[in-house]
């Protein structure tokens, strides 16, 4: 397992580079105005459908969440982009039970230190239209061990509108504490993602504000 080694200077440079990449590839990034008020720490569950999710989350954290963020990244991704460890990334190898447990226990440690942890409970990139979302058991393990820490659902939906470049849309749901099962979280986030999709399809621009 590779642990995070955050560096504020590298993070500042990463911020500039990631913003440039997002502006080049996206018309804009939007957040739903009725998004829930998110805590400044805790576990953030996010659907995972694109390589861009990590950069979109970095933007969201800077503009909205403002948490001391950490993110669980698969071992292969960390090896391809080692800079992620310098901005809060730590690795998980889903093919190794011992490594997976180590990553989950480290996540628990971060949460009890009141850090923010971004987690993709699907365990890998899946098409955004797939239902059910099929969350892995690891997220449930963390939630059961951190019942007093807030869990916040975040969904991201990508779409082509009337512009040359695609757009990304974000909805933050209300945070919850307590023993909410991972099956219930899966249903909550499916409903949240489907509701966001409907807003995008209806071209309800007044429901969103720009993040770029």
Image (cartoon, rainbow, N blue to C red):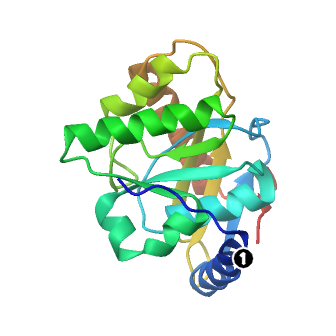
User: Which residue occupies the extreme top position in the image?
Assistant: 179
How would you rate the neighbour count of disc 1 (Cα within 10 Å): few for under 14, some for 14-19, many for 20 or more? few
Nearer to us in this view, 168 or 111: 111
Q: Is residue 73 above or below residue 28?
A: above
Q: Residue at x 53, y 71 (%)?
A: 160
Residue 5 shown left or right of residue 115 in the figure: left
* Residue position for label 1: 9
Nearer to us in this view, 174 or 73: 73
Q: Residue at x 57, y 16 (%)?
A: 147
Nearer to us in this view, 203 or 49: 49
- Asked if residue 128 shows in the view, the reply is yes
- Asked if residue 132 shows in the view, the reply is no
Dot 1: element = helix
Residue 105 shown left or right of residue 68 in the figure: left
Nearer to us in this view, 120 or 113: 113
Q: Position of residue 121 (x, y in %)?
A: 40, 40
Q: Residue at x 41, y 24 (%)?
A: 140
Q: Quadrant of residue 30?
A: bottom right
Q: Residue at x 60, y 69 (%)?
A: 167
Q: Position of residue 183 (x, y in %)?
A: 39, 22
Q: Quadrant of residue 76?
A: bottom left
């Amino acid at each position: 397992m590779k642990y995070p080694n955050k560096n504020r200077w590298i993070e500042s440079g990463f911020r500039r580079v990631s913003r440039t990449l997002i502006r080049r590839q996206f018309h804009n990034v939007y957040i739903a105005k009725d998004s829930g008020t998110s805590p400044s720490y805790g576990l953030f569950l996010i659907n995972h459908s694109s390589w861009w999710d990590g950069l979109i989350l970095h933007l969201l954290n800077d503009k909205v969440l403002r948490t001391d963020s950490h993110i669980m990244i698969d071992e292969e991704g960390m090896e391809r982009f080692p800079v992620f460890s310098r901005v809060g990334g730590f690795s998980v190898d889903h093919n190794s039970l011992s490594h997976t447990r180590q990553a989950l226990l480290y996540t628990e440690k971060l949460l009890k230190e009141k850090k923010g942890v971004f987690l993709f409970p699907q365990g890998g990139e899946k098409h955004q239209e797939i239902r059910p979302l099929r969350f892995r058991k690891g997220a449930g393990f963390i939630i059961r061990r951190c019942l007093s820490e807030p869990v916040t659902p975040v969904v991201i939906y990508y779409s082509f509108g009337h512009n040359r470049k695609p757009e990304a849309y974000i909805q933050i749901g209300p945070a919850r504490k307590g023993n909410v099962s991972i099956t219930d979280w899966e249903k909550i986030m499916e409903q949240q993602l489907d509701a966001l999709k409907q807003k995008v399809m209806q071209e309800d621009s007044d429901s969103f504000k720009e993040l770029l």
